[in-house]
Image: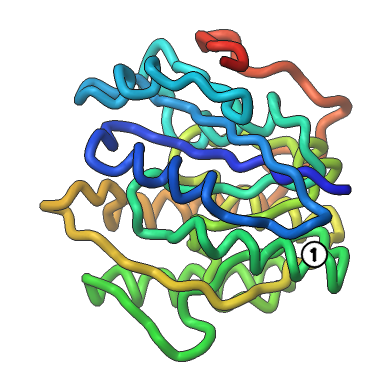
């Protein structure tokens, strides 16, 4: 029996967070899988926190950051507090469908993979609202493959599944969207393979709340260069505790 730790990061997602949680819980992962859900609120101000405070569910652990610490720090909080065999990142904005989680679990059953990423371009049904976003992802994916020896088609995908003992040994240092790039960099640098499976994608517009911009792409490129040059160690000596500036609501 394996356990999947679903890490849901949210910041001002009042309109979608309840549906994403319900969609996550509705997924039957198969007879050999259990699930825990870790929700990390990054100091939302739109009512998201109040929705989360009402949740009473033994499958769900909720963490409230006391200030906006960035999506990357939210993911790191989830990694530090997970108890499952694999973690998977689930965005709270409904661009990514949690119903896809079963396909990741099936792939683990077939391959025992160290890391599985969901690719938004495999299968040929490419959906992007903005040309600069599509072209930027293609460029950053190519750079990742050249610098780190990967064979990826979509490095910037949010839905990333990694084996617990692999991800908890990585020395992850970024706190913002750059963690989406530092994570694959250091998985590959530590000698693990990343495989991909096709996933669906329903992109939202900036008017609908999309947060990532072209500036994040530039910062991602700088992160990759720093990782390639060894500015920070790939692995940490031991698994550290969760960030201290976090309020934890224990299992309800």
- Residue 21 point in image, percent of width and height: 45, 41
Q: Residues within 10 Å of mark 1 (few under 14, many from 20)?
A: some
Instruction: Write down the residue under mark 1.
Output: 108
In this rendered view, identify the residue nearer to me: 119 or 56.
56
User: Which residue is at a point 81% across and 25% down the rendered structure image?
Assistant: 239
**What kind of element bears circle 1?**
helix
User: In the image, 45: left or right of 238?
Assistant: left
Furthest toward the bottom, the residue is: 124
| Relative vertical location of residue 45 with respect to residue 15 in this rendering, above or below | above
User: Which residue is at a point 54% across and 73% down the rendered structure image?
Assistant: 119
In this rendered view, identify the residue nearer to me: 33 or 75.
33
Q: Quadrant of residue 115?
A: bottom right
In this rendered view, identify the residue nearer to me: 133 or 113.
113
User: Which residue is at a point 29% across and 26% down the rendered structure image?
Assistant: 48
Q: Quadrant of the C terminus?
A: top right
User: In the image, 135: left or right of 5?
Assistant: left
Q: Quadrant of residue 45?
A: top left
Q: How many marks do you count on the picture?
A: 1
- Residue 18 point in image, percent of width and height: 35, 38
- Residue 112 point in image, percent of width and height: 87, 64
User: Which residue is at a point 60% across and 26% down the rendered structure image?
Assistant: 77
């Amino acid at each position: 029996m394996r356990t999947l730790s679903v890490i849901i990061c949210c910041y001002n997602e009042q309109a979608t967070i309840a549906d994403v949680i319900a969609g996550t819980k509705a997924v039957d992962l198969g007879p050999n899988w259990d699930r825990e859900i870790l929700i990390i609120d990054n100091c939302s101000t739109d009512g998201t926190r109040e929705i989360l405070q009402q949740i009473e569910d033994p499958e769900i652990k909720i963490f409230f950051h006391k200030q906006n610490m960035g999506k990357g720090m939210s993911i790191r909080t989830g990694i530090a507090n997970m108890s499952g065999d694999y973690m998977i990142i689930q965005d709270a904005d409904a661009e990514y469908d949690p119903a896809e989680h079963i396909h990741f679990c099936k792939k683990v059953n077939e391959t025992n993979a160290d890391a599985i990423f969901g690719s938004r371009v495999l299968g040929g049904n490419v959906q992007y609202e903005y040309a600069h976003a599509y072209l930027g992802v293609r460029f950053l994916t190519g750079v990742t493959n050249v610098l780190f020896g990967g064979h990826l088609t979509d490095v910037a995908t949010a839905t990333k599944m990694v084996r617990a003992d692999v991800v908890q040994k990585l020395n992850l240092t970024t706190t913002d969207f750059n963690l989406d790039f530092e994570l694959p960099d250091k998985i590959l640098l530590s000698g693990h393979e990343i495989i991909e499976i096709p996933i669906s994608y329903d992109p939202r517009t900036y008017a609908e709340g999309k947060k990532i911009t072209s500036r994040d792409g530039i910062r991602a490129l700088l992160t990759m260069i720093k990782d390639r040059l060894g500015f920070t160690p790939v692995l940490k000596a031991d698994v550290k505790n969760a960030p201290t500036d976090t309020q934890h609501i224990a299992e309800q």
